[in-house]
Image (tube, rainbow, N blue to C red):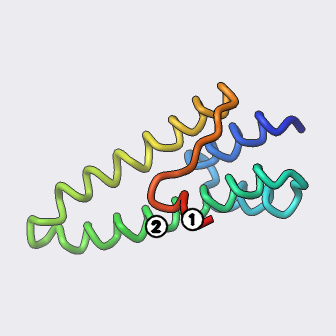
Amino acid sequence: MDSKWSKVIIHASAFFAPVLVPILFFLLSVDEEVKRISIQALLFQAVMWLLIFISSLLSFLIIGIPFLIIFGIMTIVVPIIGIVKALGETSWDYPIVGRWV
């Protein structure tokens, strides 16, 4: 499969299989760029789930509600930006976890 479409599928998997697809692409791909993007996508989803969980706990104190809204929007918007960048064949790293990998 073409590297471009592999990256598009990895970014789009945030909406239908955010854990399974990046793991499969990491294990089956030989392209280092696809492996890097799949690990970033997996880490981004894990970090966002953790941040959403923490902000939902803090929403009882009212302070977590704005963070819950911001992290919820990021969980939707960031993969869409990744899809657009992958279609344009532009190198792009996920925010928050991009420098970890």
Residue 25 as seen in the image, left or right of residue 93: right
Q: Position of residue 16 (x, y in %)?
A: 61, 47
Determine the residue positioned at 66% across, 34% down: 86
Label 1: element kind: helix
Q: Amino acid at mark 1?
A: Leu
Q: Which residue is mark 1?
A: 43
Q: Quadrant of residue 6?
A: top right
Q: Position of residue 50 (x, y in %)?
A: 41, 71
Quick check: 85 above or below 71? above
Residue 1 as seen in the image, left or right of residue 75: right
Q: Which residue is mark 2?
A: 47
Q: Amino acid at mark 2?
A: Val
* Measured Cα–Cα span from mark 2 to mark 1: 6 Å
Q: Position of residue 80 (x, y in %)?
A: 52, 36
For label 2, the crowd category at 10 Å Cα-Cα, with few meaning under 14, some 14 to 19 and many 20 or more, is: some
Label 2: element kind: helix
Determine the residue positioned at 51% across, 67% down: 46
Q: Quadrant of residue 9?
A: top right
Residue 54 as seen in the image, left or right of residue 8: left
